[in-house]
Image (tube, rainbow, N blue to C red):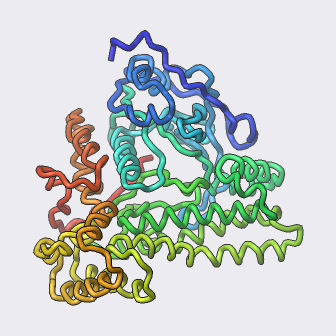
Amino acid sequence: MDAHDHIRPHFNFDNSFARSLEGFFISCQAEPASAPKLLQFNHALAKELGLDPVALDSKAGLEIFSGNVTPEGSEPLAQGYAGHQFGGFAPQLGDGRALLLGEVIDNLKQRRDIQLKGSGRTPFSRGGDGKAALGPVLREYLIGESMHALGVPTTRALAAVTTGDDVYREIPLPGAILTRVAASHIRIGTFEFGAARGDVDKVRKLADYSIARHYPETANSENQYLAFFEAVSDAQAALVARWMNIGFIHGVMNTDNMTISGETIDYGPCAFMDTYAPSTVFSSIDAQGRYAYANQPVILSWNLTRLAETLIRFINTDKDRAIELLTDKIKAIQPLYETYWLAGMRSKIGLSEKDPDDLELINDLLLVMEGGHADFTLVFRRLAQALRGHSDEIRQLFDEPDAFDVWARRWRKRLKKDGVAVETVAQAMDLVNPIYIPRNHKVEEALTAAVDQEDMTPFAKLLTVLSHPFDEVVGNEAYAAPAPNSSIPYRTFCGT
């Protein structure tokens, strides 16, 4: 690292959020870290952002990622937002432990936020210390990068550092900071924040800014705000369908955790399902199962309805007409989601053409999986093997393989209708059905080693495996295996 210390990191920041949206943020500085250490740096992402990875993977980069130095051109700020949390409205939440350093224009000419998470108290901290513990920081790094490799829109991790300072939860834990990259950090809750204050002009400015930044094609529509709502609904419907297709459970789909851009954000109590069970909940705080796996599509519509409420007065001067127009768009969300979900599931079972009976075929497989306590990820991955004439591995995943055999006969018959060569179908399936996901027990293993033993080796290995989720590698069998059976259900916790 020391060889590159003379190279000064340069971000070429722009700060359009600060310029355009007064009232939605408070300027703020990071708290200094006493003895920072760079644990993980994302060279590939740095290049994608048009940054110099050599200059950033250095002492000078560490000073920026730890919050000790504000880079040139940065105007650090904490964003304000509100949110419906488990159905109840909190009019002021905001970045209680995060700072937006600024925006860069990446190699694809897309604007991206660069944010420090865990960098200390802000005016939105509400009594918290604004810090983050190492475990949750590394968890977000791991899951975010895994989701990216799986093709799911997501925030990314540029760097993870330890601060040299403890944070106090139930026990002292090593403090850490994540440098997070996002298309933006504007949430449904950002709109609720402005609307809760009754500031119509500010909400309109936020909508105009969001349109220009994320959905410029809607600006020329006859009703640009209605078109904007439809575009956000489309992006989020596609996102949740992708979650459902890979067995991902976000765990805390509050409106402050749903981005306008349609990226997955805030990997607090999230987890991937092992055994297929629609009612699966991992989060310790979700006692009612509001955000269970099967409820995610319903919550999608609920959250978007909250966004619609903030836009009513911009849709039409006649309030009743505005509500009518928005209600029509809200009613379209579930059918839209189902279209995305069904397309994803068709590709997972190797279907290239549409058939009216496909939905029943897919739902019947899920019922067989549920009844047979089968592993969600492995069933889909092993279907291609079965197609190639090796059914032993997939049959072993079911308590009662006979039910799967009955389904498989229907499936093969359906595949014949598409008329595609078996090996072509199998190869296509292997490109959409991952063999490696962030298995909960492997994630915990990596985090425990990093936090308790200061050993980053298991983390680095897991990150490497998850970066190529579709490429089955001999020797990595342990990363594909479900957790050993346990009578204690897996629980996740918010990283606050």
Image location (x, y in percent) of residue 42: 38, 34
Tally of numbered tags: 0
The image quarter in which residue 251 lies: bottom left
Q: Is residue 160 visible?
A: no
Image location (x, y in percent) of residue 299: 53, 70
The residue depicted at 35 percent of the width and 71 percent of the height is 280
The residue depicted at 24 percent of the width and 59 percent of the height is 435
Image location (x, y in percent) of residue 422: 24, 73
The residue depicted at 67 percent of the width and 54 percent of the height is 215
The image quarter in which residue 246 lies: bottom left
363 or 221: nearer the viewer: 221
Relative placement, left or right, of 183 versus 193 is left
Image quadrant where one finds the N terminus:
top left
Image location (x, y in percent) of residue 258: 56, 57
Relative placement, left or right, of 454 versus 326 is left
Relative to residue 239, is residue 330 depicted above or below?
A: below
The residue depicted at 23 percent of the width and 69 percent of the height is 423
The image quarter in which residue 72 lies: top right
Q: Is residue 474 visible?
A: yes
Relative to residue 400, is residue 236 depicted above or below?
A: above
Relative to residue 490, is residue 110 depicted above or below?
A: above
Outermost top residue: 6
Relative placement, left or right, of 323 versus 56 is right
Relative placement, left or right, of 149 versus 385 is right
408 or 373: nearer the viewer: 408
